[in-house]
Image: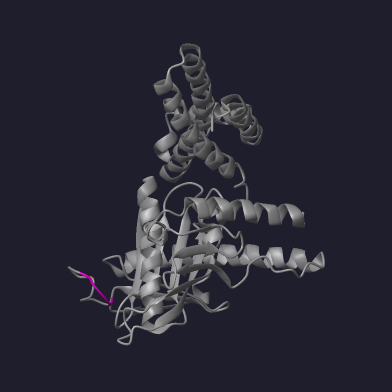
Amino acid sequence: MAVDFDNEIKHLRATMATVREVTDLERLKSEIRDLEDQVSAPDLWDDVEHAQRVTSQLSRAKTEHDRVVEMDDRIDELEVLVQLGQEESDAATMTEAEADLATLKKEVARLEVRTLLNGEYDEREAVVTIRAGAGGVDAADFAEMLMRMYLRWAERHGYPTSVLDTSYAEEAGLKSATFEVKVPYAFGTLAVEAGTHRLVRISPFDNQGRRQTSFAAVEVIPLIESTDHIDIPESELKVDVFRSSGPGGQSVNTTDSAVRMTHIPTGVTVSMQNEKSQIQNRAAALRVMQSRLLLLKKQEEDAAKKEMAGDVKASWGDQMRSYVLHPYQMVKDLRTNYEVGSTGAVLDGDIDAFLEAGIRWKRSLERAEA
């Protein structure tokens, strides 16, 4: 069936018009000029923390602006390529145009999804924690599979990550793990992964080869910034130190460098053991503790607003995605109903389509509740 390039390009331009409207390129250009003035100030680096924040904001704004402008240019180039191929009846050129169109449709859809990330903390970096749930050793193994899935996803996109804590299970897998994804909009993108994940497979740990269902919980919180002012009095913190466990080298498991920090009023607990020194682990634990308390505060505020509005409808169910490896192959999101049969690819980090479907789903819920 012949591709209707005119209609496809028209649709791409309509989508980009929405993207430009939401992005507000003129506001973005003004912001870039203001930040460039600040960066050129001779005393910028007198305050290192402020300088880092300004340069980071400038880089982020330029990237956002250039992404939109370059996409418009690529659509123009596609239109010229199609006209050239049609005028010369060149099959090779038209084949190239079809391939470019398929790529552009995916990238424009991804860019459109980015415009939906306009929540208060969506542009933040993310802290992800995975915990094994019901299912014994299979659940611990599943937790490790999920951690690998997210780290491979980040690696595919060139996003830097940092593992903050890993608590290994006795037989195999992980009891829990915490890591950072250090890229703008990581929180907004990964927030839809929060919830309970379910794995169904023939257990490799069952000598009778029986099918096993196991669960793991994923928590995603925004990384706090210095401007958030989440102050925690020392009197509200209980800090325990212990020896790191699991694989390690050098001084990792030979000294009491691991830290377990508990916020007494809320009971929120954070453990860190992947840094070499107790001081580094304490600093990392405090940063994650502040992030969790920041999100907890926002959740309490949102709950209060919903209670005042008489809204008692839950937005998130306990179980949000199933990974079935036996008796058939399928990964299905139970909120969006998006599903694929390529379980191996998903567990190897190919989760962009699930993320995009989840973001659109979440945004539609927010619009319905507005």
Nearer the observer, 1 or 203 = 1
Residue drawn where x is 64% and y is 56% of the image: 362
Q: Is residue 295 visible?
A: yes
In the picture, measured across the screen, residue 335 lies left or right of residue 166, that is: right
Q: Is residue 58 visible?
A: no
In the picture, measured across the screen, residue 351 lies left or right of residue 22, that is: left
Q: Would you place residue 11 above or below residue 112 in this image?
A: above
Q: Where, quadrant-wise, is the N terminus in this rendering?
A: top right
Q: Residue 114: where, in percent of width, then height?
A: 56, 43
Q: Residue 320: where, in percent of width, then height?
A: 56, 67
Residue drawn where x is 43% and y is 33% of the image: 43
Farthest front residue in view: 1
Highlighted magenta segment, given as a residue range: 244-248
Q: Residue 169: where, in percent of width, then height?
A: 33, 80
Q: Is residue 58 magenta?
A: no
In the picture, measured across the screen, residue 174 lies left or right of residue 226, that is: left
Residue drawn where x is 28% and y is 79% of the image: 243
Farthest top residue in view: 87
Q: Quadrant of residue 191?
A: bottom right
Nearer the observer, 178 or 170 = 170
Farthest bottom residue in view: 208
Characterize the magenta stretch by its predominant secondary structure.
loop
Q: Is residue 245 magenta?
A: yes
